[in-house]
Each structure stands twice: as structure tokens, then as C-alpha cells.
Image (cartoon, rainbow, N blue to C red):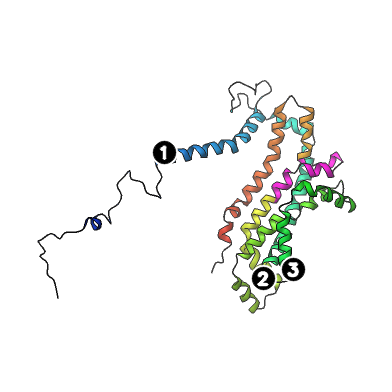
Amino acid sequence: MTVVTDPARPVDVPASDRTAGRRPRRGSFGFSSISPTEKVVRYLLLVFVLLITIGPFLWQLSTSLKGSGEDIYTRIPRLLPAQPTLSHYREVADTIPVWDYMKNSVLVAVLVVGGNIIGSSLAGFALSRLRFRFRRIVLGLFLATLVLPGEVTIISQYVTVRELGLANTLFGVALPGMIGALNVLLMFNAFRSLPVEVDQAAVVDGANVWQRFVYIGLPSVRGTISVVAIFAFIGAWDDFLWPLIVLTDPNKYTLTVGLQYLSGTFSNNPRLIAAGTMIAFIPIVIVFAVCQRFFFKGVEEGAVKG
């Protein structure tokens, strides 16, 4: 049966159907929209966090650039120096052998970063892609070491380094940090995210374990490798307690340990201390600037591209 309606006669449409495809009026907010008050609160919180994180760095930079005749303890803090100068950086170099200390820190950092990249990659690939006895126990041991604070093992580490004859050496400073449990777990998670079918196809093509590790595994986890490199470099560069325990020769001090002479000799001149802090901070900025492209694209590069 066919029902014919008059084209000239309006058809009644239910109210629910008339409002179904209509856009919400301006000013009405749903679950995914943000009210102006909430947006203002979010921006205020972001500015507050920015001041907490960037504020100390900017204050140290400003203090290192202020002249000797300028008061840094004013009632109203002044961020911009009235008499900017770079003389304090030259005084730091004249007071302590800062460049020798920096060379020692660079050597320790290179050993720690290289050891973590090589050791963590090998261990993470073995735990995630290979099948061997007690694999779960080894993985559990790596997880268990994350619970222990560093102060618990520092005595045993020193005894081990001393028995190996590496006390008062830069290699002895770098040895305990050349492979970290957290970095191993990061690489384990990165390799585990790769499809197993890729390894199976490589085995069918005749690739051995080393070929799968070098040509398939490592190119797919470059982002995680950059994360491990940055974390290892910052940890080795900023470490103060362990080099202070191992090293006894002042000529072998790292930069963080050597900067203590500025605080002891010139305790009334915080401008030199701020300048030394900025000198120690510059290499971290350089390393992060070089690795940031891989750092932020680590998740995307972990995928397999056809």
C-alpha cells in the first residue's frame, strides 16, 4: 500500500527529530568543552609550574651576570642585571681548573652513556626477544633493584671498586653507573613492543640473532635509546656523592666536586657560584638539544613502517 502525501501540505516533524541535528548554542558546554573559568585556572597553573621550574635557572643566570657593585639582595628582586658582565665566568676559570674538571666529567659521562646504550640494549633485547631458562627470574631481579635506594649499595660498590684497584680513578667513578636497571627495563619495554612477526620473517630469511638485533631491533628503538642516553648523561654529570667518595686526587675531580671550592673560598660572593653553576649546566643543554628530536619521537619510531 502506497501513501501519497500532498507536497504543499507541511509535514509534522517531532520535536526530538527537529533538534537532533542542530548544533548546540554558543555558550552551552558539554563534557568535552572547557569553560572560560577553567581555562583561566589551567593557564594560571601552567604559569605557576613554569615559574617553579624555570625561575631558579633564570635567577642563577641573572646573578652570574650582575656586576660586583650591584646588590643582588634587593627588597624587590630584579631579574635583569643593571650592570651585565661576564667577568665572573673568567674569575671561575682563574680560581679553579674548571676546564680540567669538565674534561674529567665528560670522560665519566661518555663511559656511562656508552655503557648504558650498549649494555641496556643487549640486556633489553635478550629479555624481550630471546627465550632462555630463568628469564623471568632475571627480569624480576631487575625490577627488585629499583626498590633499593642508592645509599644501600654505595658501601658495597666502593668495596668492589677498591678490590678491583679502581679507587681514585675516573673509570672507577663511571663503572657502577655504566648499566642501570631502569634503562634495561626501558629497552626491554621498547623491544617488546615490536611485532614478533618481524623477527619470525627475519629468521625465515636466514638472519641470526646479531643481525636481528642490529638491523631490525636498534633502528626501531632509536627514540628509547636517546631517552636512555639523556638520563644516563644527566645522572653521571650531576652526580656528586659517588665521585667524592671514590676520588682523593684533586686533579681527578669531576666538575660537580670541583665546584665546591667556589663555595668554600668565596662564600660571600654568590656571583662566582652562580657562574660555576651555569658552566656546569651548559653541557646538559647541548646534549638535550642534540637528542631532543629522537626524544620526542620515540613512541612513533617504535612502530614498524611498511
Mark count: 3
- Is 244 in the magenta? yes
User: Does 56 appear above or below 70?
Assistant: below
Closer-to-camera residue (150/245): 150
Task: Please tell me the numbered disc located at residue 134.
Answer: 3
Q: Could you tell me which secondary element the residue under label 3 belongs to? A: loop
Label pair 3/2, CB-CB below 8 angstroms:
no
Regarding residue 211, the answer to whether it shows in the image is: yes
Q: Name the quarter where the N terminus is drawn.
A: bottom left
Badge 2 marks a residue whose secondary structure is: helix
Distance Cα–Cα, label 3 vs label 1: 56 Å
Q: Nearer the viewer, residue 138 or 176?
A: 138
- Pick the front one: 279 or 41: 41
Apparent side of residue 23 relative to residue 131 in the rendered image (left or right): left
The magenta region covers 232-255
Q: Check disc 1 and report the residue beneath it.
A: 37
User: What is the distance, in whole Å, between disc 2 and disc 1 at their CAs?
Assistant: 54 Å
Residue at the location (36% across, 46% down)? 29
Mark on residue 244? none
Q: Position of residue 262 (x, y in %)?
A: 77, 31
Question: What residue do we see at 65% from left, 45% from top?
Answer: 286
Q: Mark 1: which secondary structure?
A: helix
Residue at the (68%, 36%) spot, across then down: 278
> Residue 212 shows which numbered tag?
2
Q: Main secondary structure of the magenta part?
A: helix
